[in-house]
Image (tube, coloured by chain):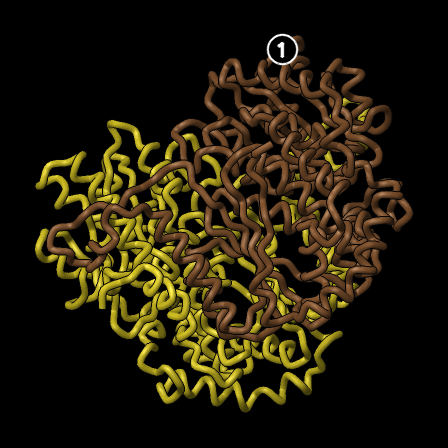
Chain colours: A yellow, B brown
Amino acid sequence: MDRKKIKLNIDNIKPFIDQKSLDALTPEIIAADEKIKKGTGKGANFLGWLHLPSRTDKKLISDINNIAGEVRKNKSILLCIGIGGSYLGSRAGIEFLSPLFSNKRGIGGEGVFFCGNNLNSDYIEDLLGSLEKDADIYVNVISKSGTTIEPALAFRLVYDYMRKRYDKKELTKRVICTTDKEKGALKKMASQQGFRTFVIPDDVGGRFSVLTPVGLFPMACAGVNIEELLNGAADLEQDVSKEKIETIDAYKYAAVRNALYRQGKHIEILSDFHPSLHSVLEWCKQLLAESEGKEGKGIFPSIADFTTDLHAIGQLIQQGARNIFETFVIMQASGKKAQIPQLEEDIDQLNYLAGKTLDYVDSMAYRGTVQAHTTGGVPNMTLQIPERSAYCLGQIYYFFEISVAVSGYLLGINPFDQPGVEAYKNNMYKLLNKPR
Amino acid sequence: MDRKKIKLNIDNIKPFIDQKSLDALTPEIIAADEKIKKGTGKGANFLGWLHLPSRTDKKLISDINNIAGEVRKNKSILLCIGIGGSYLGSRAGIEFLSPLFSNKRGIGGEGVFFCGNNLNSDYIEDLLGSLEKDADIYVNVISKSGTTIEPALAFRLVYDYMRKRYDKKELTKRVICTTDKEKGALKKMASQQGFRTFVIPDDVGGRFSVLTPVGLFPMACAGVNIEELLNGAADLEQDVSKEKIETIDAYKYAAVRNALYRQGKHIEILSDFHPSLHSVLEWCKQLLAESEGKEGKGIFPSIADFTTDLHAIGQLIQQGARNIFETFVIMQASGKKAQIPQLEEDIDQLNYLAGKTLDYVDSMAYRGTVQAHTTGGVPNMTLQIPERSAYCLGQIYYFFEISVAVSGYLLGINPFDQPGVEAYKNNMYKLLNKPR
């Protein structure tokens, strides 16, 4: 099959890491691969994401598409309530695949708005206040427990708003819960009120949940082809299961990152040259930071949107402290082609580019940047994305998931837990006098 | 006068830096202060920003407000073309002061869109394609030289679009250039075509230009009270000129950051708890990174939007590598008050919060986070912002500008140049076969 595969290029690592150091990591990579595939490593009860692409039930996909079709029919607004892994994946997907501007509402004009990802009055009040009186509104609330404070409080406010707007029957139709299959506050409420539900599997953690209904349903509501998305991920899943360890790009990525980390490169800049990739990198950032950042270890991930950020943190990348490395995530083809027009008199002296596309210039900016950063002492790799398609997006998700699992085991930590996230919550609950 | 002042709290630094180490920096701070005030340090020909707040001509303010009033009259769209310091400051201001959602177009419904800050076809085509046929459009192109490739190419495309849309007379009225007072391609074109212009002063670099027409005009077009903005900055300017060195918050901020940097804390996380602050921190990030990141030195700045990012990089901040410190930038009052409603049966067990506002819970999340990060070994400070007002925003701008000037001199570098930004450009021009 001749499908468009994402590809990692590590040529620019050579001036910084010799092949021997990389080869020396192979036994550790093999051990990590075995832990993942046999489920013998730390956190092995959260490996459900591993076979989601190939094993997702056709019935589930059609259920998701059916309800999403209902939402899309009247050009409804979807208020999607979730935090962390319960919104970053679908936001990434929707922004990756939608127009960057639209005169219709919601991300890319697709009607989806996210909330429940902060505790801010202005945010929720401005959002609800901006909804037209005749807008058709659906709600998707995403929470395993139903008691995580941000989405739970947002849901209270949104539910209150919906009750004023719709009668009981309409309301029941318009709230879709993505939650635990049997326990928890949200599941209980859904059962009592007759809300439709999707299940978050027990063996999939929040940041690995993008290919469960957590990510799939909001994306389907925005018109994303979720079968193609799963196909992309499934093809990568198959490569990982069949290819030789040394040839798997996601493993190479883990190995190079680990080798650089051991050299004292403690900051990774994830750099894109296409605005639609920004939220994809936000999703990556969470996945990497929350999986690796523990036991005093972990690479600090940061995002740069180029060329704009070449005029922001570009100076620091070029000449600042040499504790950074860079992963370019590059879109090889834009959807549109903006052709540079001729200008009389050539006042700005750019007529030599007339007739070329903006993206041609962008691709040269990318190449120029790679050269500059390599020369400036910044080790870098490039993940090449052939196009803005659901098929490529599915590969991106799976690439980073499998890679961070390997990388976590190379660091000797559990890549699937997040014990540190409780600290602020416990303090907050005390300050709020939460009843025991 | 009883005006709302921003304030820095450094109490949580105490477990990490003793007062003696801070006091030891005082002579260096005094020396830096002198370099700035007497213009005897590196880059002294770019100190024009220092007295912009107090010395900006009333005539300039009224010119800006007059043209902005013309733009606002017909609820026009403003296409604002600029990159780096030529857009980050005004975007920050507009997002800080506008609703977070609106059913009108542009940032906060104020009609302003930014472009020319990347080289992406999808971005510019989607933006122009989203403009309604009957929309009234103005353009503000911001570039000192007129030949910076991103804004220059965007201007070619936008100019082409405008020529198809408006006749010569209308077009001339609708393009406003912010550029050099006498030289450069954009100035030349403005003179030839009769476009109205604003001047970028020679002694103000891009990232320090927010209080020149570069930032003031787009903000005025979005309805920002630029006099109040300048008043806020001017009050801080006066404090810096009159107060004792040891009591100036912006200098304390520079001293603490430098002391932490010397301890090996090489990453600064700028953390907000209000979405309207995100772009303000993006502006800060550019200012800090481009001013400090040179000669192999500099703190790496990164942004976290809480509470959402507590569920993203929160784990890493709490338990990852201890090479980070944190600067909270906290809004003390939101504009709206979302009151938490009672829920029958209390299924989510949050009725104990009913009647409280979302922001009350947010403030406890902030306090809980500060405790957790302090305990977790992350030195942290808090810059308190009393309210979302132009007066406070003006103070924020000046605070970070004067602080990074001091900080740059503490590092022994020139805080006002950016020699590293040329590297990628030179490579790119070669790849594009730019004629000499």
Which amino acid type is marked by label 1?
A: Glu
Question: What x and y, as percent, mark residue B392?
Answer: 57, 38
Decide which of A49, A346 is in the foreground and name it: A49
**For this view, does B91 lie left or right of residue B194?**
left
Question: What x and y, as percent, mark residue A253?
Answer: 56, 73
Decide which of A240, B315 is in the foreground and name it: B315
Instruction: State the image quarter where residue A374 is shown.
Output: bottom right
Crowd rating for badge 1 (residues with CA inside 10 Å; few <14, some 14–19, many 20+): few
Q: For numbered disc 1, what is the local secondary structure?
A: helix
Q: Is residue B316 visible?
A: no
Query: What's the residue at 49%, 46% (across, down)?
Result: B331
Query: What's the residue at 49%, 72% (across, down)?
Result: B375
- The quadrant of the image that shows the N terminus of chain A is bottom left
Question: What x and y, as percent, mark residue A220?
Answer: 30, 50
Residue under mark 1: which chain is it in? B
Which residue, given by chain and number where applicable, does mark 1 sit on?
A: B170
